[in-house]
Image: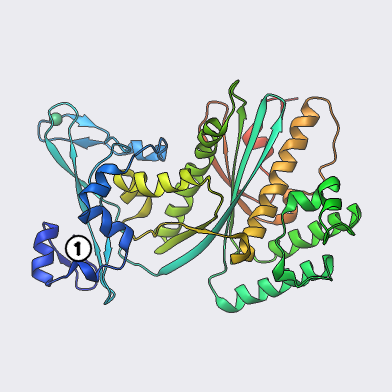
Amino acid sequence: MTDYKNKKKFDTVVGMFKELDLDPSDWINKEQKEFYFNQKKRERTLQNVRYYPKELDKIILTCTNSHTFTPNWLEKRFPSMPFRTRDGHLLQPITAQVKCPICDEHTDINLPVNSNYIGDAHLYGDEAMRDINEKIIMSYSVVSQPRKMDIHLKFKSEFLALKKELVPQLPPDRWVLHYTELMNGGQRKKIKHLSHITKPETLLFSKKLGKLISEYPDQLVKWNCTGIYHKPIKYRKEQERELKSRVYYPLLGRIITEHTDSGMSPHFHFERTGADGWAKNLFNGGRLTLMWPFISRVLPIPNPTFNIPTDSIYFEIADFISFVIARYLYVIGKRAEGKYLDFECLPSWLGEIRYLGYTEVGTCMFETESDYPLEKFFKGTDWFPVK
Ligand SMILES: [Zn+2]
Protein backbone atom coordinates (compact mmCIF):
# COMPACT_ATOMS: atom_id res chain seq x y z
CA MET A 1 0.00 0.00 0.00
CA THR A 2 1.19 3.48 -0.71
CA ASP A 3 -0.11 6.77 0.63
CA TYR A 4 -0.01 9.04 -2.39
CA LYS A 5 0.08 12.34 -0.48
CA ASN A 6 2.95 11.49 1.83
CA LYS A 7 4.52 8.89 -0.51
CA LYS A 8 4.78 6.42 2.34
CA LYS A 9 4.87 2.70 1.72
CA PHE A 10 3.55 -0.11 3.86
CA ASP A 11 4.13 -3.84 3.64
CA THR A 12 0.74 -4.84 4.93
CA VAL A 13 -2.70 -3.30 5.27
CA VAL A 14 -2.63 -4.00 9.02
CA GLY A 15 0.74 -2.23 9.35
CA MET A 16 -0.64 0.75 7.47
CA PHE A 17 -3.67 0.92 9.75
CA LYS A 18 -1.45 0.98 12.83
CA GLU A 19 1.11 3.44 11.59
CA LEU A 20 -1.40 5.94 10.19
CA ASP A 21 -3.76 5.39 13.12
CA LEU A 22 -6.65 4.82 10.71
CA ASP A 23 -10.23 3.97 11.49
CA PRO A 24 -12.12 1.75 8.98
CA SER A 25 -15.16 4.01 9.41
CA ASP A 26 -13.15 6.74 7.65
CA TRP A 27 -13.18 4.90 4.30
CA ILE A 28 -15.45 6.62 1.85
CA ASN A 29 -15.33 4.27 -1.13
CA LYS A 30 -17.74 1.93 0.56
CA GLU A 31 -18.03 -0.85 -2.03
CA GLN A 32 -14.27 -1.46 -2.01
CA LYS A 33 -14.04 -1.30 1.77
CA GLU A 34 -16.76 -3.95 2.06
CA PHE A 35 -14.76 -6.39 -0.03
CA TYR A 36 -11.76 -5.94 2.25
CA PHE A 37 -13.53 -6.19 5.58
CA ASN A 38 -16.56 -8.38 4.88
CA GLN A 39 -15.42 -11.96 4.33
CA LYS A 40 -19.01 -13.19 3.86
CA LYS A 41 -19.59 -10.71 1.05
CA ARG A 42 -16.39 -11.82 -0.58
CA GLU A 43 -17.35 -15.47 -0.33
CA ARG A 44 -20.90 -14.95 -1.56
CA THR A 45 -19.93 -12.88 -4.59
CA LEU A 46 -19.78 -14.90 -7.79
CA GLN A 47 -17.08 -14.17 -10.31
CA ASN A 48 -18.47 -14.91 -13.75
CA VAL A 49 -16.83 -12.21 -15.87
CA ARG A 50 -15.46 -14.09 -18.90
CA TYR A 51 -13.65 -11.29 -20.67
CA TYR A 52 -10.34 -9.53 -20.04
CA PRO A 53 -8.26 -7.31 -22.36
CA LYS A 54 -6.05 -9.63 -24.41
CA GLU A 55 -3.02 -7.31 -24.18
CA LEU A 56 -2.68 -8.43 -20.55
CA ASP A 57 -1.39 -11.75 -21.88
CA LYS A 58 1.83 -9.97 -22.79
CA ILE A 59 2.66 -9.86 -19.08
CA ILE A 60 4.87 -12.83 -18.26
CA LEU A 61 6.06 -13.63 -14.73
CA THR A 62 8.92 -15.78 -13.52
CA CYS A 63 8.74 -17.53 -10.15
CA THR A 64 11.74 -18.18 -7.86
CA ASN A 65 12.05 -21.63 -9.44
CA SER A 66 12.39 -20.04 -12.91
CA HIS A 67 9.00 -21.14 -14.25
CA THR A 68 7.48 -18.59 -16.60
CA PHE A 69 3.73 -18.08 -16.75
CA THR A 70 0.94 -15.54 -17.38
CA PRO A 71 -1.35 -14.86 -14.43
CA ASN A 72 -4.93 -16.10 -14.38
CA TRP A 73 -6.63 -12.73 -14.84
CA LEU A 74 -10.17 -13.83 -14.04
CA GLU A 75 -9.66 -16.21 -11.13
CA LYS A 76 -11.51 -15.07 -8.02
CA ARG A 77 -9.05 -13.73 -5.45
CA PHE A 78 -8.56 -11.20 -2.66
CA PRO A 79 -9.07 -7.69 -4.13
CA SER A 80 -6.36 -5.14 -4.94
CA MET A 81 -8.26 -1.89 -4.63
CA PRO A 82 -7.53 1.57 -3.26
CA PHE A 83 -8.98 3.23 -0.19
CA ARG A 84 -10.10 6.81 0.00
CA THR A 85 -10.31 8.40 3.40
CA ARG A 86 -12.51 11.29 4.45
CA ASP A 87 -9.53 13.64 4.70
CA GLY A 88 -8.67 13.13 1.02
CA HIS A 89 -6.04 10.40 1.30
CA LEU A 90 -5.85 7.81 -1.40
CA LEU A 91 -4.13 4.59 -0.35
CA GLN A 92 -3.23 2.25 -3.17
CA PRO A 93 -1.79 -1.26 -3.24
CA ILE A 94 1.29 -1.31 -5.49
CA THR A 95 1.96 -5.03 -5.75
CA ALA A 96 -0.06 -8.23 -5.60
CA GLN A 97 0.96 -11.85 -5.16
CA VAL A 98 0.42 -14.43 -7.85
CA LYS A 99 0.82 -18.17 -7.38
CA CYS A 100 2.97 -20.04 -9.90
CA PRO A 101 0.71 -22.64 -11.57
CA ILE A 102 3.58 -25.17 -11.67
CA CYS A 103 5.16 -25.05 -8.19
CA ASP A 104 2.67 -22.89 -6.17
CA GLU A 105 5.42 -20.42 -5.16
CA HIS A 106 4.20 -16.83 -4.73
CA THR A 107 5.61 -14.15 -6.99
CA ASP A 108 5.07 -10.40 -6.72
CA ILE A 109 3.47 -8.56 -9.61
CA ASN A 110 3.70 -4.77 -9.89
CA LEU A 111 0.31 -3.12 -10.33
CA PRO A 112 -0.04 -0.31 -12.94
CA VAL A 113 -0.81 2.35 -10.31
CA ASN A 114 -1.87 5.82 -11.40
CA SER A 115 -1.39 7.92 -8.27
CA ASN A 116 -2.52 11.14 -9.94
CA TYR A 117 -6.22 11.06 -9.12
CA ILE A 118 -8.00 14.06 -10.68
CA GLY A 119 -11.73 13.53 -10.23
CA ASP A 120 -14.87 11.74 -11.37
CA ALA A 121 -16.56 11.50 -14.78
CA HIS A 122 -20.22 10.61 -15.30
CA LEU A 123 -21.13 8.19 -18.05
CA TYR A 124 -24.52 7.11 -19.35
CA GLY A 125 -25.28 3.94 -21.30
CA ASP A 126 -28.13 2.56 -23.37
CA GLU A 127 -28.65 -0.41 -25.68
CA ALA A 128 -30.37 -1.33 -28.94
CA MET A 129 -31.08 -4.81 -30.30
CA ARG A 130 -32.28 -5.88 -33.74
CA ASP A 131 -33.30 -9.29 -35.03
CA ILE A 132 -32.28 -10.01 -38.55
CA ASN A 133 -33.31 -13.54 -39.53
CA GLU A 134 -30.77 -15.84 -37.86
CA LYS A 135 -28.70 -12.97 -36.55
CA ILE A 136 -28.90 -10.64 -33.57
CA ILE A 137 -27.45 -7.13 -33.64
CA MET A 138 -26.47 -6.19 -30.10
CA SER A 139 -25.39 -2.59 -29.74
CA TYR A 140 -24.45 -0.59 -26.68
CA SER A 141 -23.52 3.09 -26.48
CA VAL A 142 -22.06 5.19 -23.69
CA VAL A 143 -21.77 8.99 -23.55
CA SER A 144 -19.89 11.13 -21.07
CA GLN A 145 -21.55 14.15 -19.54
CA PRO A 146 -19.32 17.21 -20.23
CA ARG A 147 -17.19 17.74 -17.13
CA LYS A 148 -17.46 21.52 -17.24
CA MET A 149 -20.78 22.61 -15.78
CA ASP A 150 -21.27 25.54 -18.21
CA ILE A 151 -20.79 23.25 -21.22
CA HIS A 152 -23.15 20.64 -19.77
CA LEU A 153 -25.81 23.33 -19.23
CA LYS A 154 -25.33 24.77 -22.72
CA PHE A 155 -25.68 21.34 -24.34
CA LYS A 156 -28.69 20.54 -22.18
CA SER A 157 -30.52 23.74 -23.08
CA GLU A 158 -29.84 23.22 -26.81
CA PHE A 159 -31.09 19.63 -26.59
CA LEU A 160 -34.24 20.66 -24.70
CA ALA A 161 -34.87 23.42 -27.28
CA LEU A 162 -34.82 20.77 -30.05
CA LYS A 163 -37.27 18.61 -28.09
CA LYS A 164 -39.51 21.63 -27.54
CA GLU A 165 -39.52 22.31 -31.29
CA LEU A 166 -40.60 18.70 -31.93
CA VAL A 167 -43.24 18.55 -29.18
CA PRO A 168 -44.28 22.15 -28.39
CA GLN A 169 -47.24 21.17 -26.20
CA LEU A 170 -45.15 19.61 -23.38
CA PRO A 171 -42.24 20.87 -21.27
CA PRO A 172 -39.25 19.10 -22.91
CA ASP A 173 -37.86 17.78 -19.61
CA ARG A 174 -41.15 16.11 -18.75
CA TRP A 175 -41.14 13.42 -21.43
CA VAL A 176 -38.48 10.92 -22.39
CA LEU A 177 -37.30 10.57 -25.97
CA HIS A 178 -37.23 6.87 -26.90
CA TYR A 179 -35.97 6.75 -30.42
CA THR A 180 -37.74 3.56 -31.56
CA GLU A 181 -41.07 5.10 -30.54
CA LEU A 182 -40.35 8.25 -32.50
CA MET A 183 -39.11 6.54 -35.67
CA ASN A 184 -41.70 3.77 -35.88
CA GLY A 185 -44.83 5.17 -37.56
CA GLY A 186 -47.17 2.71 -35.85
CA GLN A 187 -45.81 3.38 -32.36
CA ARG A 188 -45.68 7.13 -32.92
CA LYS A 189 -49.39 7.26 -33.80
CA LYS A 190 -50.28 5.54 -30.51
CA ILE A 191 -48.38 8.02 -28.31
CA LYS A 192 -50.42 11.15 -27.74
CA HIS A 193 -47.60 13.71 -27.65
CA LEU A 194 -45.84 12.17 -30.68
CA SER A 195 -48.87 11.42 -32.88
CA HIS A 196 -48.81 14.76 -34.74
CA ILE A 197 -45.24 14.26 -36.02
CA THR A 198 -44.73 13.31 -39.67
CA LYS A 199 -41.98 11.08 -41.00
CA PRO A 200 -40.05 13.95 -42.71
CA GLU A 201 -40.18 15.81 -39.38
CA THR A 202 -38.60 12.86 -37.54
CA LEU A 203 -35.79 12.79 -40.11
CA LEU A 204 -35.18 16.51 -39.84
CA PHE A 205 -35.12 16.24 -36.05
CA SER A 206 -32.63 13.33 -36.22
CA LYS A 207 -30.33 15.33 -38.44
CA LYS A 208 -30.43 18.32 -36.09
CA LEU A 209 -29.84 16.14 -33.05
CA GLY A 210 -26.90 14.41 -34.74
CA LYS A 211 -25.42 17.78 -35.61
CA LEU A 212 -25.81 19.04 -32.04
CA ILE A 213 -24.05 15.95 -30.68
CA SER A 214 -21.22 16.27 -33.23
CA GLU A 215 -20.59 19.86 -32.15
CA TYR A 216 -19.20 18.77 -28.76
CA PRO A 217 -16.52 16.28 -29.85
CA ASP A 218 -14.17 16.64 -26.88
CA GLN A 219 -16.69 17.31 -24.14
CA LEU A 220 -19.44 14.85 -25.05
CA VAL A 221 -17.37 11.73 -25.68
CA LYS A 222 -19.13 8.73 -27.26
CA TRP A 223 -18.40 5.01 -27.36
CA ASN A 224 -20.21 2.21 -29.13
CA CYS A 225 -19.72 -1.52 -29.12
CA THR A 226 -21.77 -3.68 -31.48
CA GLY A 227 -21.69 -7.42 -31.88
CA ILE A 228 -23.47 -9.45 -34.58
CA TYR A 229 -24.29 -12.94 -33.36
CA HIS A 230 -25.87 -16.04 -34.76
CA LYS A 231 -29.16 -16.44 -32.98
CA PRO A 232 -29.02 -19.55 -30.78
CA ILE A 233 -31.84 -22.07 -31.43
CA LYS A 234 -32.97 -21.56 -27.88
CA TYR A 235 -33.00 -17.80 -27.41
CA ARG A 236 -34.41 -16.66 -24.10
CA LYS A 237 -33.43 -14.12 -21.44
CA GLU A 238 -30.46 -16.19 -20.35
CA GLN A 239 -28.95 -16.38 -23.85
CA GLU A 240 -29.74 -12.70 -24.41
CA ARG A 241 -27.85 -11.82 -21.22
CA GLU A 242 -24.90 -13.87 -22.36
CA LEU A 243 -24.71 -12.07 -25.72
CA LYS A 244 -25.09 -8.71 -23.98
CA SER A 245 -22.20 -9.44 -21.66
CA ARG A 246 -19.95 -10.07 -24.68
CA VAL A 247 -20.64 -6.52 -25.88
CA TYR A 248 -20.67 -4.78 -22.49
CA TYR A 249 -17.57 -6.17 -20.84
CA PRO A 250 -15.03 -5.12 -23.51
CA LEU A 251 -16.73 -1.74 -23.82
CA LEU A 252 -16.82 -0.98 -20.10
CA GLY A 253 -13.30 -2.32 -19.60
CA ARG A 254 -12.08 -0.03 -22.36
CA ILE A 255 -13.90 3.02 -20.95
CA ILE A 256 -12.61 2.37 -17.42
CA THR A 257 -9.00 2.20 -18.64
CA GLU A 258 -9.31 5.27 -20.88
CA HIS A 259 -10.46 7.24 -17.85
CA THR A 260 -8.12 5.87 -15.22
CA ASP A 261 -5.09 6.30 -17.54
CA SER A 262 -5.72 10.04 -17.31
CA GLY A 263 -6.50 10.02 -13.59
CA MET A 264 -10.29 10.06 -13.92
CA SER A 265 -12.61 7.76 -12.06
CA PRO A 266 -15.59 6.71 -14.24
CA HIS A 267 -18.98 6.63 -12.59
CA PHE A 268 -21.45 4.67 -14.75
CA HIS A 269 -25.17 5.26 -14.86
CA PHE A 270 -27.49 2.67 -16.36
CA GLU A 271 -31.23 2.65 -16.80
CA ARG A 272 -32.99 0.72 -14.09
CA THR A 273 -34.56 -2.13 -16.00
CA GLY A 274 -34.57 -5.02 -13.58
CA ALA A 275 -32.36 -6.92 -16.06
CA ASP A 276 -29.12 -5.27 -15.04
CA GLY A 277 -27.45 -8.38 -13.64
CA TRP A 278 -24.54 -8.19 -16.09
CA ALA A 279 -23.49 -4.76 -14.76
CA LYS A 280 -23.66 -5.93 -11.16
CA ASN A 281 -21.59 -8.98 -12.11
CA LEU A 282 -18.88 -6.88 -13.68
CA PHE A 283 -18.63 -4.49 -10.77
CA ASN A 284 -18.79 -7.17 -8.08
CA GLY A 285 -17.15 -10.27 -9.52
CA GLY A 286 -14.74 -8.19 -11.60
CA ARG A 287 -13.38 -6.47 -8.48
CA LEU A 288 -12.28 -9.86 -7.14
CA THR A 289 -9.90 -10.53 -10.03
CA LEU A 290 -6.34 -9.57 -10.86
CA MET A 291 -7.74 -7.93 -14.02
CA TRP A 292 -9.41 -5.21 -11.93
CA PRO A 293 -6.30 -3.29 -10.71
CA PHE A 294 -4.97 -3.54 -14.27
CA ILE A 295 -8.02 -2.02 -15.98
CA SER A 296 -8.67 0.50 -13.18
CA ARG A 297 -5.02 1.56 -12.65
CA VAL A 298 -5.76 1.11 -8.91
CA LEU A 299 -8.01 4.17 -8.84
CA PRO A 300 -11.37 4.01 -7.03
CA ILE A 301 -14.28 3.01 -9.30
CA PRO A 302 -17.68 3.47 -7.71
CA ASN A 303 -20.47 0.96 -8.22
CA PRO A 304 -22.78 1.92 -11.10
CA THR A 305 -25.96 3.80 -10.36
CA PHE A 306 -29.26 2.52 -11.73
CA ASN A 307 -31.46 5.45 -12.64
CA ILE A 308 -34.86 6.18 -14.14
CA PRO A 309 -34.65 7.67 -17.68
CA THR A 310 -35.79 11.16 -16.59
CA ASP A 311 -32.76 11.47 -14.28
CA SER A 312 -30.46 12.60 -17.10
CA ILE A 313 -30.74 13.78 -20.71
CA TYR A 314 -27.64 11.67 -21.48
CA PHE A 315 -29.76 8.50 -21.36
CA GLU A 316 -31.72 9.94 -24.29
CA ILE A 317 -28.50 10.78 -26.13
CA ALA A 318 -27.13 7.24 -25.61
CA ASP A 319 -30.50 5.81 -26.75
CA PHE A 320 -30.34 7.88 -29.94
CA ILE A 321 -26.75 6.84 -30.73
CA SER A 322 -27.56 3.14 -30.18
CA PHE A 323 -30.66 3.48 -32.36
CA VAL A 324 -28.77 5.10 -35.23
CA ILE A 325 -25.96 2.52 -35.25
CA ALA A 326 -28.21 -0.53 -34.79
CA ARG A 327 -30.57 0.73 -37.53
CA TYR A 328 -27.62 1.37 -39.86
CA LEU A 329 -26.27 -2.16 -39.39
CA TYR A 330 -29.76 -3.62 -39.72
CA VAL A 331 -30.11 -1.94 -43.14
CA ILE A 332 -26.63 -3.16 -44.16
CA GLY A 333 -27.68 -6.70 -43.18
CA LYS A 334 -31.01 -6.46 -45.04
CA ARG A 335 -29.30 -5.14 -48.18
CA ALA A 336 -26.85 -8.05 -48.00
CA GLU A 337 -29.90 -10.32 -48.20
CA GLY A 338 -31.20 -8.44 -51.22
CA LYS A 339 -33.85 -6.36 -49.48
CA TYR A 340 -33.39 -2.65 -50.12
CA LEU A 341 -34.19 -0.40 -47.13
CA ASP A 342 -33.44 3.25 -46.45
CA PHE A 343 -30.88 4.09 -43.75
CA GLU A 344 -32.97 7.06 -42.53
CA CYS A 345 -30.36 8.14 -39.95
CA LEU A 346 -26.62 7.94 -40.53
CA PRO A 347 -23.79 7.33 -38.02
CA SER A 348 -21.77 10.03 -39.83
CA TRP A 349 -24.20 12.65 -38.44
CA LEU A 350 -22.98 11.90 -34.91
CA GLY A 351 -19.36 12.93 -35.41
CA GLU A 352 -16.43 11.11 -33.89
CA ILE A 353 -17.21 7.91 -31.96
CA ARG A 354 -14.90 5.37 -30.34
CA TYR A 355 -16.13 2.20 -32.03
CA LEU A 356 -15.52 -1.33 -30.81
CA GLY A 357 -16.30 -4.29 -33.04
CA TYR A 358 -15.26 -7.87 -33.69
CA THR A 359 -13.40 -9.80 -36.31
CA GLU A 360 -14.94 -13.06 -37.52
CA VAL A 361 -12.86 -15.00 -35.01
CA GLY A 362 -14.11 -12.82 -32.18
CA THR A 363 -11.10 -10.56 -31.60
CA CYS A 364 -12.14 -7.15 -30.33
CA MET A 365 -11.14 -4.18 -32.51
CA PHE A 366 -11.12 -0.50 -31.69
CA GLU A 367 -11.33 2.53 -34.02
CA THR A 368 -12.08 6.18 -33.44
CA GLU A 369 -13.99 7.29 -36.55
CA SER A 370 -16.47 9.91 -37.72
CA ASP A 371 -18.42 7.25 -39.62
CA TYR A 372 -19.13 3.59 -38.87
CA PRO A 373 -15.92 1.62 -39.71
CA LEU A 374 -17.86 -0.89 -41.80
CA GLU A 375 -14.95 -1.91 -43.99
CA LYS A 376 -12.56 -2.42 -41.06
CA PHE A 377 -15.05 -4.41 -39.01
CA PHE A 378 -16.80 -6.42 -41.75
CA LYS A 379 -14.44 -6.74 -44.70
CA GLY A 380 -14.73 -10.16 -46.30
CA THR A 381 -18.15 -10.94 -44.79
CA ASP A 382 -21.58 -10.77 -46.49
CA TRP A 383 -21.93 -7.30 -45.01
CA PHE A 384 -18.83 -5.96 -46.72
CA PRO A 385 -17.93 -8.34 -49.54
CA VAL A 386 -14.53 -7.92 -51.16
CA LYS A 387 -15.14 -6.98 -54.79
ZN1 LIG B 1 7.13 -22.04 -10.21
Q: Quadrant of the rendered structure where residue 120 is?
A: bottom left
| Residue plotted at (56% across, 77% down) | 149
Residue 379 seen in the current view: no
Residue 26 placement (x, y as % from top left): 23, 71
Residue 123 placement (x, y as % from top left): 53, 60
Residue on which the image places disc 1: 2
Q: Is residue 341 left or right of residue 79?
A: right
Quarter holding the N terminus is bottom left
Q: Is residue 25 above or below residue 343?
A: below
Mark 1 falls on what kind of element?
Answer: strand
Residue 193 seen in the current view: yes
| Residue plotted at (20% across, 48% down) | 96
Q: Which scheme is used to colour this image of the protein?
A: rainbow
Nearest the eye: 332 or 277:
277
Nearest the eye: 343 or 87:
87
Quarter holding the C terminus is top right
Q: Within the displayed image, which quadrant is ligand 1 positioned in?
A: top left
Residue 220 placement (x, y as % from top left): 60, 64
Q: Quadrant of the rendered structure where residue 89 is?
A: bottom left
Q: Is mark 1 within 8 Å of ligand 1?
A: no
The amino acid sitting under disc 1 is Thr
Residue 286 placement (x, y as % from top left): 36, 45
Q: Is residue 26 above or below residue 127?
A: below
Q: Is residue 156 left or right of residue 52?
A: right
